[in-house]
């Protein structure tokens, strides 16, 4: 059952695009850790987690990890440099970044839930409508 759920969620963006549904993508940078690295101009670099959010009619449906990047302005910059997992591990091992960062990059439960709070609201409304229709239905 879990395998079927995981496979269907992985296929969702592809299926939506194939059916011509208004599926959008937004790439985000999330601050993970400060580093001791700087740019050539002396601006401090931060370790950021890159993600790709899929949304249908502006409602988030899926989030995908794209790994780590280095960026200025505490990851508020649109310019970033993607780094491989081996490089992230090297930065962590050499104490350039915080020691608690996971390699490879993965989401915390809080980060996964961010932007998807509308799901419980829709579920509650759907159940309320279903119960009302069931209760108002005349007896056979």
Image (cartoon, grey):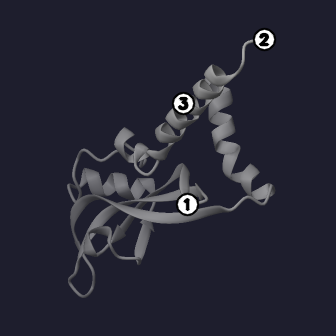
Q: Is residue 131 left or right of residue 87?
A: right
Could you say where residue 11 lies in the image, as x and y percent from the top left? Answer: 70, 44
Residue that appears at 32% across and 72% down: 76
- For image coordinates 20% across by 83% down, the residue present is 42
Q: Secondary structure at mark 2?
A: loop
Q: Relative to 136, say whether 28 is above or below.
A: below
Compared across the picture, whether 60 is left or right of 113 comes to right
Residue 100 image label: none
**Helix, strand or loop at mark 3:** helix
Q: Quadrant of the N terminus?
A: top right
Mark 2 vs mark 3: give the one in front: 2
Is 25 in front, or is 20?
20
* Separation of marks 2 and 3 at Cα, in angstroms: 22 Å
The residue that mark 3 highlights is: 128
Residue ID at (48%, 46%): 118
Q: Residue furthest top?
A: 140
Quarter-of-image position of residue 20: bottom right
Residue 127, image x, y percentages: 56, 29
| 110 relative to 45 in the view: left or right | right
In the picture, residue 126 is in which quadrant? top right
Quadrant housing the C terminus: top right
Residue 84 drawn at (x, y percent): 45, 59
The residue at the far front in this view is: 138
Disc 1 target residue: 58
Which residue carries the number 2 mark? 140
Nearer mark to the viewer, of 2 and 1: 2
Residue 40 position within the rendered picture, expressed as x and y whole percent measured from the top left:
27, 85
Work out whether mark 2 precedes mark 3 in sequence or the reverse, and give the earlier one: 3
């Amino acid at each position: 059952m879990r395998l079927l759920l995981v496979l269907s969620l992985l296929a969702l963006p592809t299926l939506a695009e194939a059916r011509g549904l208004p599926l959008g993508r937004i790439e985000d940078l999330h601050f993970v850790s400060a580093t001791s690295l700087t740019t050539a101009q002396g601006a401090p670099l931060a370790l950021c987690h890159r993600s790709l959010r899929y949304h249908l009619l502006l409602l988030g449906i899926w989030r995908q990890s794209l790994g780590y990047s280095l960026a200025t302005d505490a990851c508020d910059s649109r310019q970033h440099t993607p780094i491989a997992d081996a490089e992230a591990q090297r930065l962590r091992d050499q104490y350039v970044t915080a020691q608690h960062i996971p390699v490879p990059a993965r989401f915390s439960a809080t980060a996964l839930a961010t932007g998807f709070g509308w799901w419980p609201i829709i579920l509650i409304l759907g159940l309320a409508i279903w119960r009302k229709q069931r209760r108002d239905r005349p007896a056979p």
